[in-house]
Image (spheres, grey):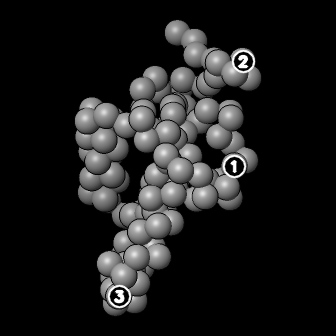
C-alpha cells in the first residue's frame, strides 16, 4: 500500500505513520517545518492550544497543574498542524487510547 501527499507528491512512510493514524496526518510533508506558524492558523489544534493557554481557565491554575497539562499538550505536538475537519470520533478515540497505553507503559 502506498500513500502520497497530494499537493507535493511526496510519499508518506506508512510503516512509520499507518494510514488513518494521528501520525499519518501529522506526517504530511506540507505540515513539516511549519510548527512555529501552527499556533497562529485558525482551524487547527495548535490555535486552540494557544488560545487555551491565554485563557484564565489555564492561567489561573497552579504551576504544578500547568506543568502537568503541558505534558499532555506536548504529547499532541505532532498533530497541532492537522486540520480540525480531519478529526472524527474514531481518530480521537485512537489518539486517546494511544495516550493511555503510553502512560501505562513501564518506565525504563
- The reply to whether residue 64 is visible in this rendering is no
Q: Few, some or many C-alpha atoms within 10 Å of disc 3 (few <14, some 14-19, many ≥20)?
A: few
Residue found 68% across the figure and 35% down from its top: 30
Percent position of residue 23, x then y: 49, 38
Mark 1, residue position: 34
Tag 2 and tag 1, C-beta contact below 8 Å: no
Task: Decide: few, some or many residues near mark 2? Use Cα within 10 Å; few <14, some 14-19, many ≥20.
Answer: few
Instruction: Kindly identify which residue carries mark 3.
Output: 60
Residue 65 left/right relative to 74: left
Badge 1 density bin: few <14, some 14–19, many ≥20, Cα 10 Å: few
Residue 69 as seen in the image, left or right of residue 9:
left
Residue placed at 31% from the left, 59% from the top?
Answer: 103
- Nearest to the observer: residue 90 or residue 49: 49
Secondary structure of the residue carrying tag 1 is loop
Query: Residue 95 lies in what quarter of the image?
Result: top left
Q: Residue 61: which quarter of the image? A: bottom left
The residue labelled by disc 2 is 9
2 or 3: mark nearer the eye:
3
Check if mark 3's residue and mark 1's residue have beta carbons within 8 Å.
no
Distance in Å between CA atoms under marks 2 and 1 = 18 Å
Query: In the rendered structure, which disc, 2 or 1, sits on the residue that comes first in sequence?
Result: 2
Amino acid at each position: 500500500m502506498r500513500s502520497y501527499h497530494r499537493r507535493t507528491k511526496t510519499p508518506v512512510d506508512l510503516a512509520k505513520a499507518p494510514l488513518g493514524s494521528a501520525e499519518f496526518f501529522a506526517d504530511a510533508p506540507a505540515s513539516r517545518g511549519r510548527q512555529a506558524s501552527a499556533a497562529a492558523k485558525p482551524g487547527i489544534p495548535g490555535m486552540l492550544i494557544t488560545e487555551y493557554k491565554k485563557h484564565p481557565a489555564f492561567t489561573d491554575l497552579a504551576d504544578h497543574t500547568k506543568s502537568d497539562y503541558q505534558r499532555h499538550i506536548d504529547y499532541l505536538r505532532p498533530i497541532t498542524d492537522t486540520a480540525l475537519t480531519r478529526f472524527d470520533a474514531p481518530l480521537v478515540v485512537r489518539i486517546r487510547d494511544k495516550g493511555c497505553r503510553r502512560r501505562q507503559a513501564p518506565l525504563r
